[in-house]
Image (cartoon, coloured by chain):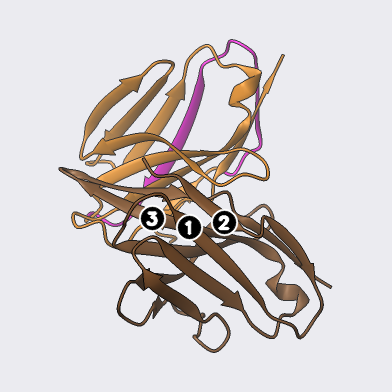
Amino acid sequence: SAVISQKPSRDICQRGTSLTIQCQVDSQVTMMFWYRQQPGQSLTLIATANQGSEATYESGFVIDKFPISRPNLTFSTLTVSNMSPEDSSIYLCSVERNTKNSYEQYFGPGTRLTVT
Amino acid sequence: QKEVEQDPGPLSVPEGAIVSLNCTYSNSAFQYFMWYRQYSRKGPELLMYTYSSGNKEDGRFTAQVDKSSKYISLFIRDSQPSDSATYLCAMSDNYGQNFVFGPGTRLSVLP
């Protein structure tokens, strides 16, 4: 498994501001992912963050709105820019662990964001 | 048709009941199948993992995969109030690509 921490755990932000969420893993991983989970909904993948390359964004998500950094193999940040109330959600990072016959994802505890 | 479908519930059962949670999917390329448990205000926790078809048992939990029917199940025996959570199925193809989550089923086990 993997131990993943996220900061902040929660925040309340004003419309138009930006928030950077940090994700720290206890060991080196190649692939890290950022998800959004709106209240009562399942997980929506925002982007895949690989170290040493630009993040790959899913349809409906753009770099200007959700810039991502991946400076090393244990850390990543997601910024939610120019926030609006529609960005209120839980943001989760996850990592993929590949073993023989296994591709597993492990999740951080999430960052609960409220935009007023 | 959504790629992965799951009954959203909520599902309420008495303590000690056998719970059956199910997902159907449409992409025949999926080879890896997972169940996650998510408690309120927590991140999803990997519960069970299965490769291709077959059964896997871990304590009170049994995961079944029927690739011919594109149907996966999670059974919980002797359910406990601590099992109350949202259960999400997830699956990916043979290279860990195209990782897709179901919408989740909210389970309440009543004491």
| Marked residue chain, label 3 | A
Q: Colour of chain B?
A: orange
Q: Position of residue A31 (x, y in %)?
A: 32, 63
Q: Amino acid at mark 1?
A: Gln
The residue under the point 42% across, 42% down is B23
* Foreground disc of the pair 1, 3: 1
Residue to which mark 1 is pinned: A24
| Marked residue chain, label 1 | A
Check the picture and name the quadrant holding the C terminus of chain A: bottom right
Q: Position of residue B61 (x, y in %)?
A: 42, 22
| B73 in the magenta segment | no
In the rendered structure, the answer to whether residue B44 lies left or right of residue B50 reads right
Q: Amino acid at mark 2?
A: Gln
Write the start and end of the magenta stretch as one range.
B8-28
Q: Could you tell me how far apart the alpha carbons at marks 2 and 1 are, in whole angstroms?
A: 6 Å
Residues marked 2 and 1 touching at CB (< 8 Å) = yes
Residue to which mark 3 is pinned: A95
Element under disc 1: strand
Residue B70 seen in the current view: no
* Foreground disc of the pair 3, 2: 2
Mark toward the start of the polypeptide (1 vs 3): 1
Identify the image quadrant of residue A91: bottom right
| Marked residue chain, label 2 | A
